[in-house]
Amino acid sequence: MQPIQLFELAARQAEWLSVRQEVVASNIANANTPKYLAKDITPFSAVLDTTTTAQMARTNPNHMALNDLSDDDIEIKESELNDEIGMQESGNSVSIAEELTKTGEIKRQHELNTNLVASFHRMMLMTVKR
């Protein structure tokens, strides 16, 4: 029987969401700091491409080995300039509206993640109880 990778994948996304929330909170905290450039992290799809849980299992020793998970996959970089506000006179590039939108996205993704894990966990318990 192959191990179930859903929990590992959900944990990886939860870690990514946590890092993104930290970056967004930092952007909001520095909204009035002169010359502060807004930051964001690599999208989860890019992290998912390097994650072994989404790839096929190795069923034969002659198959190519998969890479291990690594925290180096999540990269913090400067965010693209918002067309609506651009660069402010102070040199700051933080858009509060955009950062609050990101916060809402993070909240929805976290709720979806936890609901999927809870549902899968309930399904597993139902199969064990029988």
Image: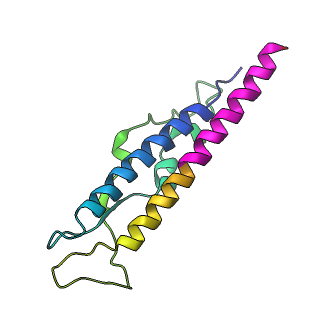
Residue 91's quadrant in the figure? Answer: bottom left
Task: Identify which residue, 56 or 22, lies in the foreground.
Answer: 22
Q: Main secondary structure of the magenta part?
A: helix
Report the residue at 29% width, 72% height from top: 94
On the rendered image, what quadrant is the C terminus found in? top right
122 within the magenta span: yes
Residue 91 is at least partly visible in this image: yes
Report the residue at 15% width, 73% height from top: 35
Q: Residue furthest right?
A: 130
Q: Residue furthest top?
A: 129
Decide if residue 128 is on the left or right side of residue 73. right
Task: Identify which residue, 96 or 1, lies in the foreground.
Answer: 96
At which x and y percent is residue 123? Answer: 76, 28
Task: Identify which residue, 59 or 72, lies in the foreground.
Answer: 72
At which x and y percent is residue 58? Answer: 61, 30
For residue 36, above or below residue 53: below
Residue 55 is at least partly visible in this image: no
For residue 2, above or below residue 76: above
For residue 77, above or below residue 56: below
Report the residue at 65% width, 28% height from top: 4
At which x and y percent is residue 31? Answer: 25, 68
Q: Which residues are magenta?
A: 110-129
